[in-house]
Amino acid sequence: MSGSRIMKAAAAMALAAAILGAPFWWNALRGMKQKAPEPEKPVVGKECVLPAADMRKNHMTLLFQWRDDVVRKGDRAPVTIGGRQYEKSLTGSCLKCHTKKENFCDRCHNSLASGPACFDCHIDTSERGPWN
Amino acid sequence: MELTRLEFLNKAWRTGLVIFGGASFELVSGTSLTAGGQPAAAGKRLAMAVDVRACMKAGQCVKCINACHRGHNVPAIPDVKRAITWIWRDDLERAMPGVMDSYSGTAFHGAKPVLLCNQCGNPPCVRVCPTGATWKRGDGIVMMDQHRCIGCRYCMAACPYGSRSFNWNDPRRYLAKKLINRDYPTRTKGTVEKCDFCAERIDRGREPLCAAACTEKAISFGNLHEDGSAVRKALADRIALRRKPELGTDPAVYYLL
C-alpha cells in the first residue's frame, strides 16, 4: 500500500517537473539558442572613447563617471582620445556617432531586458526623437 | 544595587547626552553643507539683482520666463497645483511680506517682479535632502542632481520661497516636441526641480538665460565677492531687499528698489 503511494507521489512530482520545466527542455530539444544582439555600427566615427571590448563591458561606468564630473563637480572639460575631443555627454557625444538609439542602445538592452532610465529625461537626438 | 528614582533619572540623562550629544552638535553647527564634496571656490558667490522698477516698467513682460522655461524644457501645466515653475512673477507684497503698507512704497503697489530660486547661502533644502540630490556648489549655486532625487519633497517643505516644483506627471506630456530644446534634458515623473542659475551656461562662461533675455536690463548677474562685477555695480547705488532675510537663509537674489 505505502509502496504504491510513494510511486504515485514520484510520478506526480516528475510530471510537475516536466510541465514546469517545459520552456527549458522544449527549447533545448528544438536546438534554440538566444541570438546575440547586433547593435548597428556607427557610420561616422571609427574610434570610440574606449576600445570596443571595454565599452561593451564598462560603458555604464564611464557614463556614471561623466555624469558625476559634469553634474556634481561642474567639470565639463572635454575628454581627448586619439586627438579628438569629446564632450562628456550622452546625447552630445555618444549619440553623435551612434545616431540611432533604437538600433544601438535598444538592441542590446531589449535583448537583455535591461532598461536603464537614461532616456526618461535625456533627449533621444536621433530622427525618431525627442521621444516616443 | 538599588537605584532611587532620582539616581536613575540622573544616570539616564547623562547617558543620553553621551550618546546623542555628538550627533546633535553636528546638527546645530551645520558644518557639512557642501555635500557635493567640492572645495569652496575662493571668494566666489554668484548672485543676481532684479531691478523692480525696470521689471514694473515692462508691464506684463514674460521674456525671461519664456527664455528660461523654453531653454530648460519646463512644461506649461495648466493646473496651478501641479505647475512647474523655475522663474515666475508674483506680487512684491506677497514675495516680501511687510516691506510696505498703505502709505509707504505706494509706487510699488501692484508690482510683480520676477521670482526664482534664491540660491541661499544657508539653504534649508540642502539640509533636509536625504540623498544629497540637492547641494551647494563652491560658487554658491544650489544645484539639483535629478539622478539622485527620490521625490520625497522634503526640500519643498523646507524652502520658504516656494521655489521648487514637483513632477506629479510625466512632464513630456505637456511639452511640444517641436519646441523642445534638444541640448537640455527634461525631467521625469516623481522628481523635484528648480532654477539652478543656468549652471550649464555658467560652466561655459555664459550668463543665465533670464538675464540674457531681459530687454529692460532688469537682471544683473555676477560674482558678489568681486568688485566691479555687474551685480555689485547694480547693488552699489540702490537700496536692495532680499526675500525673508530674517529666516537666516542668506538669499543671493536682490531686489533693487
Image (tube, coloured by chain):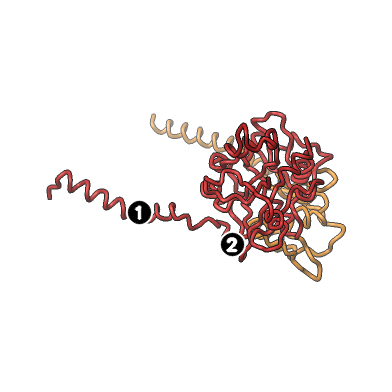
Chain colours: A orange, B red
Q: Residues within 10 Å of mark 2 (few under 14, many from 20)?
A: some
Task: Indicate the chain on which mark 1 is placed.
Answer: B
Q: Nearer the viewer, residue B118 or B186?
A: B118
Look at mark 1 in the image and give the residue it sits on. B21
Q: Position of residue B67 (x, y in %)?
A: 78, 44
In 3D space, how far apart are the residues under numbered discs 1 and 2 (Cα atoms)?
A: 28 Å
Q: Are marks 1 and 2 on the same chain?
A: yes
Whether tag 1 and tag 2 are in contact, CB under 8 A, the answer is no
Whether A52 is drawn above or below A122: the answer is below
Three-letter code for the amino acid on which mark 1 is drawn: Gly
Q: Residues within 10 Å of mark 1 (few under 14, many from 20)?
A: few
Q: Position of residue B174 (x, y in %)?
A: 75, 34
Q: Earlier in the sequence, mark 1 or mark 2?
A: 1
Q: Residue at x 40, y 55 (%)?
A: B25
Look at mark 2 in the image and give the residue it sits on. B38
Q: Residue at x 81, y 67 (%)?
A: A84
Secondary element type, mark 2:
loop
Three-letter code for the amino acid on which mark 2 is drawn: Gln
Q: Residue furthest front?
A: B103
